Image (spheres, rainbow, N blue to C red):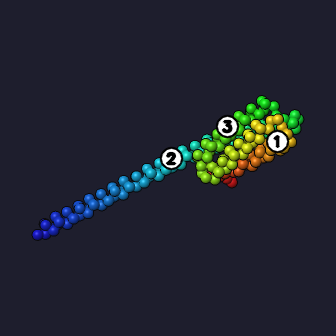
Amino acid sequence: MSEWMTAGAGLVGAALGAAGAVFGAGRAAKAALGQAELQQRHADDLWRREQRRVAYTALLEVLEESVGLEPEINSAIVRTRGMPQELVARLNSVLQRTRAAATKVELCGPQEVSEAAGAVRAAAHAALMAVVHGHETTNEMTEEILTALRVRGAAHEAFRRAASEALGFTP
């Protein structure tokens, strides 16, 4: 009879060992899946951050180009009381690219940056309309152009701050 008890105890021990092995394998598999999900989320976050960085940079570059035109615009308004067609065409091109770049940023998010990009896009549109309709400048139209450019400048700065924060570059 003691042989049966020894065999039974051995069988129970083997069953418990097998159950422990199955449980351990299940935990290991679950941990591996959790790690894979974590790595995928991290990869997705890196991809999203890179897409945002590219979109934000494109908008900032075209905004800097438009800022570079402002002295020429101011000079043309003061000197000639109007804007040469060539300058209007260059500004039109820059502002169209600003609107396109801002639209891409709005798609990338996050919400604060999208809103700031929307303000840039709206300000660029207002500046474009003021310039296109104001190239035969009157005093009122000159003021409208300069106001639109100032608003665009404020929107530019708000976007720069929001983009910097979204990318983690805030001090």
Q: Secondary structure at mark 3?
A: helix
Q: Residue at x 87, y 36 (%)?
A: 81
Q: Residue furthest top?
A: 86
| Residue assigned mark 2 | 43
Q: Amino acid at mark 2?
A: Ala
Q: Secondary structure at mark 1?
A: helix
* Mark before the other along the chain sequence, 2 or 1: 2
Q: Position of residue 92 (x, y in %)?
A: 72, 35
Residue 116 place in picture, x, y as percent = 67, 50
Query: Would residue 82 be found to the left or right of residue 32 on screen?
Result: right
Quarter of the image with the N terminus is bottom left
| Discs 1, 3 touching: Cβ within 8 Å | no
Compute the Cα span from label 2 to label 1: 50 Å
Give the residue number, with chain letter if any, for mark 3.
97
The 10 Å Cα crowd at callout 2, few under 14, some 14 to 19, many 20 or more, is few
Tell me if 10 is positioned left or right of 23 in this view: left
Tag on residue 58?
Answer: none
Q: Of residues 64 and 171, which is closer to you in this image?
A: 64
Counting residues from the start of the chain, the first of labels 1 and 3 encountered is 3
- Asked which secondary structure carries label 2, the reply is helix
Q: Position of residue 95 (x, y in %)?
A: 71, 38
Q: Amino acid at mark 3?
A: Arg
Depth check: 68 or 127 in front?
127
Which numbered disc flags the more N-terminal residue, 2 or 3?
A: 2
Q: Residue at x 64, y 40 (%)?
A: 101
How far is mark 1 from mark 3, CA to CA? 23 Å
Residue 143 appears left or right of 52: right
Q: Nearer the viewer, mark 2 or mark 3?
A: 3
Toward the bottom, the furthest residue is: 1
Pointer 1 residue: 141
Q: Residue furthest right?
A: 79
- Residue at image point 67% right, 37% down: 97
